[in-house]
Amino acid sequence: MPAADPRLIVPLDLPTVAEARDMVARLGDAVSFYKVGLELFASDGMALARELKGQGKQVFLDWKLHDIGATVQRSAAVLAGAGCDFLTVHGEPQVMAAAVRGRQGSDLKVLAVTVLTSLTDADLAEMGFSETAASLVERRIRQAIAAGCDGVIASPKEAALARRLGGPGFLVVTPGVRPDWADRNDQQRVAAPAQALADGASHIVCGRPITAAADPRAAALRVAAEMAA
Ligand code: C5P
């Protein structure tokens, strides 16, 4: 039985903590890294995060913090104290710098969400930005590096740019990953696991191809085998 690939992150996009626990039990030793998002935050997600840490798993808190610096700094400090591994914040310079201050002295890695992939150039113009999404993504990757962030969330399309700008130790975490055999669901620009890694991803987030499979554990092992190849 191969060990779980620590570069594979499975998002627990489930409505209740009970269902998330059940999924973790089904995946067993095939998965070692989980993402807990806003849906579970609203239903005791932090308790689940602590439980997962207690089981020796790695935990990615995808809470996309966005507030005044003092609040972000204190929140990041509390989350760092819980022993979690990754935390997302919005890619604004004040927010990123505050999170980096907050996690000081801990192993918590701060990842910047550059531009939400749901935003088009037209949406950004309506919000008052004079840049395209692609140009804002690049600006924010540079600002994340300057703020001392450990990495960014990047679509497979942006992974190579993030890797080039951030250098070898930078974390590039890529959702929108789909093996050839899986349904794309609502993801538009997808890459296969091995391709995302070849393009510069340090970690991939792969959800429904695993969690919606008839046999989630077998699907996770299949994704991990593709990553190894
Ligand atoms: O099931 P699937 O593999 O599409 O799940 C992808 C996960 O990554 C979800 O938790 C989704 O919210 C998250 N995500 C994404 N695209 C982004 C940022 C986050 O799909 N640009």
Image (cartoon, rainbow, N blue to C red):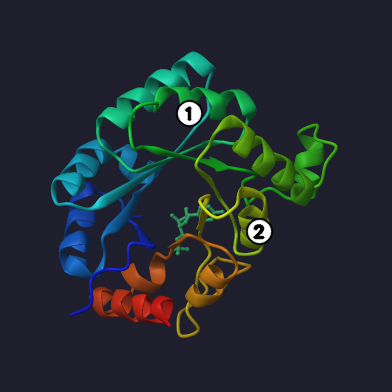
Q: Quadrant of residue 97?
A: top right
Q: Give the structural element (helix, strand or loop) at label 1.
A: helix
Residue drawn 53% across the image and 64% down it: 176
Inspect the image, locate mark 2, and give the three-letter code of the amino acid beneath it: Glu
Residue 196: image x %, image y %? 54, 69
Say if 51 sits above or below 168 in the image.
above
User: Would you say 61 lies left or right of 2 here?
Assistant: right
Q: Which residue position holds label 2?
A: 158
Residue 152 place in picture, x, y as percent:
55, 47
- Residue type highlighted by circle 1: Val
Question: How dense is the environment of label 1, judged by Cα within 10 Å: few (below 14), some, or many (20 and up)?
Answer: many
Given this view, does label 2 or label 1 mark the residue nearer the observer?
1
Q: Residue at x 68, y 57 (%)?
A: 161
Quadrant showing the N terminus: bottom left
**Assess mark 1: CB under 8 A from ligand 1?**
no
Residue at 46 percent of width and 23 percent of height: 101
Residue at 23% in and 77% down: 2
Q: Secondary structure at mark 2?
A: loop
In terms of sequence position, does the residue under pointer 2 or pointer 1 come before the other?
A: 1
Number of numbered discs on residues: 2
Q: Quadrant of residue 203?
A: bottom left
Residue lying furthest top: 70
User: Which residue has dot 1 on it?
Assistant: 100
